[in-house]
Image (cartoon, helix red, strand yellow):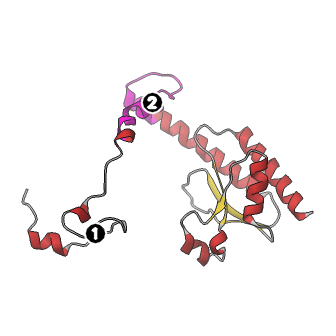
C-alpha cells in the first residue's frame, strides 16, 4: 500500500467536529477511542446471543435468532407506541420512518410539549420535550426551538408499559385541556 503524499493530506478536507484541529494529520483523527465501551462489546454480544429462546447452536446462530426476536419485539412496541400517541385527538406524529427504533416524536394541538412532558414526568413517564439537536428540522416543521415530545422504548420495554404511557398521556392531555 502506498502512503498519501504530503500535498494530498493538506488538500483533503474531512467532515469533522468543530473542536477538531485543522492541522494535518490531527484533522483526520476523531479523538480518543471509547475504550470502556470497547471492553464491553464481547459481553454485549454474549448477552444478546443468550436471549435465543432455545439456547442451542453456535454463538453466531444464537445471536442471529436473538436479533430476529428483538427486531419483532421492537416492531410490536413501536406499533403500540404509535397507536397510543395517535389515539389522542389533535396529535401530530412526526415519526414516519418505515424501519425504525421504537420512538415517536409528536405534538398535541394547542398544548405545550413541555407541559405535557412535565405531566408525564409526574406519572413517572420519561418523555422529554425538545428539538433533540435537530433544531433546523424542527424549525422546518414549524415547531421552533420548543420542538416536540419524544417517547422511546428499549428492547426490555413491555406492552404493559406502553399501555401505562397511553393512560398517562390521555390523562395529561385531559388535565391540560380542562
Residue 2 spot, x, y in % from top left: 6, 60
Q: Which mark is residue 49?
A: 2
Disc 1 crowd, CA 10 A, few/some/many (<14, 14-19, 20+): few
- Image quadrant in which you'd find residue 34: top left
Disc 2 crowd, CA 10 A, few/some/many (<14, 14-19, 20+): many
Of 38 and 23, the residue lying toward us: 23
Q: Secondary structure at mark 1?
A: loop
- Image quadrant in which you'd find residue 40: top left
Of 96 and 26, the residue lying toward us: 26
Q: Residue at x 68, y 53 (%)?
A: 127
The part of the chain drawn in magenta is 38-64
Q: Which mark is residue 14?
A: 1
Q: Secondary structure at mark 2?
A: helix
| Drawn side of residue 80 relative to residue 48, left or right | right
Residue 72 spot, x, y in % from top left: 58, 42
State which quarter of the image contains the C terminus.
Answer: bottom right
Whether residue 43 is situated above or below residue 144 in the rendered picture: above
Amino acid at each position: 500500500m502506498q502512503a498519501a503524499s504530503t500535498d494530498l493530506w493538506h488538500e483533503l478536507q474531512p467532515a469533522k467536529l468543530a473542536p477538531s484541529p485543522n492541522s494535518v494529520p490531527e484533522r483526520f483523527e476523531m479523538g480518543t477511542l471509547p475504550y470502556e465501551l470497547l471492553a464491553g462489546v464481547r459481553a454485549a454480544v454474549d448477552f444478546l446471543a443468550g436471549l435465543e429462546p432455545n439456547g442451542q447452536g453456535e454463538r453466531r446462530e444464537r445471536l442471529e435468532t436473538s436479533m430476529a426476536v428483538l427486531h419483532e419485539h421492537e416492531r410490536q412496541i413501536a406499533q403500540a407506541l404509535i397507536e397510543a400517541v395517535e389515539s389522542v385527538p389533535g396529535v401530530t406524529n412526526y415519526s414516519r420512518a418505515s424501519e425504525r427504533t421504537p420512538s415517536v416524536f409528536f405534538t398535541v394541538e394547542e398544548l405545550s410539549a413541555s407541559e405535557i412532558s412535565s405531566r408525564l414526568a409526574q406519572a413517572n413517564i420519561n418523555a422529554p420535550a425538545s428539538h433533540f439537536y435537530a433544531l433546523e428540522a424542527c424549525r422546518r416543521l414549524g415547531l421552533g426551538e420548543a420542538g416536540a415530545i419524544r417517547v422511546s422504548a428499549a428492547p426490555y420495554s413491555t406492552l404493559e408499559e406502553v399501555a401505562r404511557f397511553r393512560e398517562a398521556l390521555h390523562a395529561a392531555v385531559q388535565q391540560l385541556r380542562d
